[in-house]
Amino acid sequence: MRCVRVPAITTTSPAPSGPVVESTAPAKVVAAIAEARREGTITGPVPWITTSTQRFARVSGDGPGAADVPVYAIELQGHFVLDNAPRPLGARSPEGSTMIVLVPLGDGELGGAGVVLGATVTDLSSFGDVHWYSGSS
């Protein structure tokens, strides 16, 4: 996976009544959340959407990818340290309080996987319909 930093898009909070939190999600979403728990601490329910790499790039400003691949975009809040991210020799591992993980929907998709590390919550509704997941992954 590649790690990039992007400027904040828009910050929002769920409606005052709160989101409808589901106890199930696609297997790839659940697996990405479980993997992220090994990278850091996740707080609260996890929002996710189905979008495409080019739509995500267009809205986030994270440069267009070579191919337009359908992906799940999963936003995690908490504390994350990406020890395996590329960085200059001697530089500290990137850290953030939000992490968006992009996971290709299909098996064997070329491209589409990635991580966006940041400090603010992103309004995922800019990319698609938001689902909220809470489960023991």
Image (cartoon, helix red, strand yellow):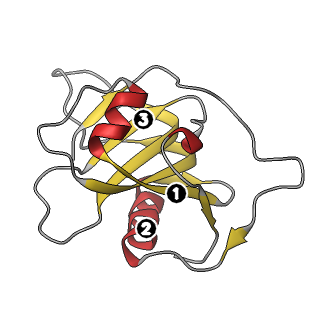
Residue 54, percent from left and from top = 28, 38
Please give left or right for residue 61 compared with residue 75 in the image: left
Between 110 and 99, the one lying in front of the other is 110
The residue that mark 2 highlights is: 29
The answer to whether mark 1 and mark 2 are in CB contact below 8 A is yes
Residue 70, percent from left and from top = 28, 56
Whichever of callouts 3 and 2 sits on the residue coming sooner in the sequence is 2
Kindly report which numbered mark, 1 or 3, lies closer to the viewer in this rendering. 1
Query: As shown in the figure, which amino acid type bears the numbered disc 2?
Result: Val
Residue 57: name its quadrant: top left
Disc 1 to disc 2, how far (Cα)?
A: 8 Å
Q: Which label was assigned to residue 2?
A: none
Whether 55 is drawn above or below 107: the answer is above
Residue 27: name its quadrant: bottom left
Query: As shown in the figure, which amino acid type bears the numbered disc 3?
Result: Leu
Q: Residues within 10 Å of mark 2 (few under 14, many from 20)?
A: many
- Residue at 60 percent across and 37 percent down: it is 123
- Residue at 52 percent across and 23 percent down: it is 8
Disc 1 to disc 3, how far (Cα)?
A: 15 Å
Q: Secondary structure at mark 1?
A: strand
Please give left or right for residue 91 compared with residue 78 in the image: left
Whether 72 is drawn above or below 85: the answer is below
Whether 6 is drawn above or below 115: the answer is above
Disc 3 to disc 2, how far (Cα)?
A: 17 Å
The residue that mark 1 highlights is: 48
Between 57 and 83, the one lying in front of the other is 57
Q: Secondary structure at mark 3?
A: strand
Residue 64, percent from left and from top = 22, 30
The residue that mark 3 highlights is: 117
Residue 115, percent from left and from top = 33, 43
